[in-house]
Image (cartoon, rainbow, N blue to C red):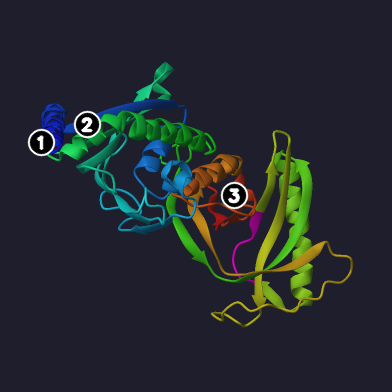
Amino acid sequence: MTRIIEFLIALGIVAGLFVIIGVALPGERHISESIETNRKMTIVFDTVNSLRRFKDWNPLVLRDPAVELKYSGPAAGVGARMDYASKEASLGEGSWEITESEPGKRVAIAIEDVSKGHDKKTSFTLEPTGKGGRNVKITQDYSVKYGFDLFGRYAGLYVSRHIGDDLKLGLSRMANMLATVPNIDYRTAEAPLTDLAIVDVAAEDLLVVTAGNVDRGQETITKSIKDNQEWIKRVMEANNLEAAGPFRIITTDFGQEKYAFDIAQPVKKKGTEGASAEQLTVKIDGGAPVKYVHVAPHRSAHAAYTGHMAGLDIARNALRAWAVTGGNEVIDRPYETWKDGVDKSFTADGTYDIYWAVK
C-alpha cells in the first residue's frame, strides 16, 4: 500500500511539473528564414502569389512524392487554394490558402495540417536588395498558436528544428527553381507583351519548310522566308489549297550570328471556309523542300507582341517565363504568326501572336 501511495505522489509531482512547465512555455511560436535571388521581382512575386509551383519547391512533396494535390479558386491571389492528401500519417490531409496579397511586397497563406496548434500562417515578404535593387530578398515567416493546449506548447519546442528546417530547405529549393526561369520581366516595357493567357489551339494543317541556319541579317532572313514561301505556294496550287491564316516562323535556335527556323503556312482545301480542320492528303512533287504536318489540338501559352522582329527572342523568353512561373511546363518549339507579312515585321510596327505549347 505504501508503494502505491509513493507511486501516486511521484506521479502527481510529475504531472504538476508537466503543467507548471507547460503553462510557462510560450502559447505561440514564430520563426523566420530568408534567401536572396537575382530573378526579377515580377517573377518572384508571381511565384509566391500562386500555389501552382508548390510541388517544385515545398519539402512536403519530398516526404511523399505520391501526395495528391488539388487546386481550387483563382489561379493566383487571394482565394487561391491547394488541398493535399497523403497516406503518410505524418502528413495526412491539409491545405494552403492565400489570404493576403500585396503586389510586389507580401503574400500571406493560411495553413491547415495535422500538426499541433491552430491559426497556422506563413507569409512571404519581398524586398529589393543588392546593387541598384536588382536582387530580391525573400523572407518566409511561420507562426502557430497553441492556446492552453499543453501538449501543443511542448510540441512548440521542436518548431525551430522541424518547421525551421523545412523553411530553409523550401527557400533553397525555391531559389534553385527560380534560377531556371528566364530572367525577363514580362509585365514591363522590357518585353511589351499583351493578352497573356493559356489558350486551346485547334487542330491545324501546315505546309512547312526548314530554312536551315541563316545569318541573322535582315536581308538574309527576308530572302530565306520569301524564297521558301514560293515553294509553299507551288505546293498549295498543286493541291488546291489556300491559306488558313498568316504564315508563322517556328524557332529552332536564335544564336548571336545565326538563326535556325522553319517557315510554316496553315492551309485548308479551297472553299472550306468555316469547316473544322481535317487531316489532308497532300502530294509534294518536283523536289520541293516542303513537308505536310498535321498538328493535333493542344494547349499553349499565348501573348501578343508589337515591335521589330529582332525583339521576338526576348518576347519568346518572356512568354516562357510567364508560363513556367504559373506552373506550366513548356514543350516543343515556340512560334509566331507574322500578321503583317515579312517587310513590315522588320519595323517597329510589326504585330505577332506568340505561342509556346504547354503540357
Residue 70 to residue 134: above or below: below
Instruction: Specify whether 213 is left or right of 134.
Output: right
**Residue 86 in picture, x, y percent from top left:** 40, 55
| Numbered marks: total | 3
10 Å crowding of disc 3: few (<14), some (14-19), many (20+) = some
Which one is nearer the viewer's eye here, 341 or 156?
156
Name of the residue lying farthest toward the front? 1
Residue 19 to residue 54: above or below: above
Q: Amino acid at mark 2?
A: Arg
Q: At x 16% / y 28%, what residue is drawn?
A: 25
Q: Is residue 136 visible?
A: no
C-alpha separation, residue under disc 1 versus residue under disc 2: 39 Å
Instruction: Specify whether 164 is left or right of 334.
Output: left
**Secondary structure beneath label 2:** strand
Question: Which corner quadrant of the image does residue 187 belong to?
Answer: top left
Magenta range: 243-249
Question: Which corner quadrant of the image does residue 245 belong to?
Answer: bottom right
**Secondary structure beneath label 3:** helix
Find disc 3 in the rendering and name its residue.
344
Mark carried by residue 5? 1
Instruction: Please tell me whether residue 193 belongs to the stretch shown in magenta.
Output: no
**Residue 153 in picture, x, y percent from top left:** 19, 34
Name of the residue lying farthest toward the top? 131
The first of marks 1 and 3 along the sequence is 1
Q: Nearer the viewer, mark 1 or mark 3?
A: 1
Find disc 2 in the rendering and name its residue.
29
Which one is nearer the viewer's eye here, 1 or 295?
1
Instruction: Specify whether 318 is left or right of 254.
Output: left
Which one is nearer the viewer's eye here, 345 or 209?
209
Q: At x 77% / y 62%, what residue is drawn?
A: 230
C-alpha separation, residue under disc 3 versus residue under disc 2: 62 Å
Q: Are marks 1 and 3 in contact (CB under 8 Å)?
A: no
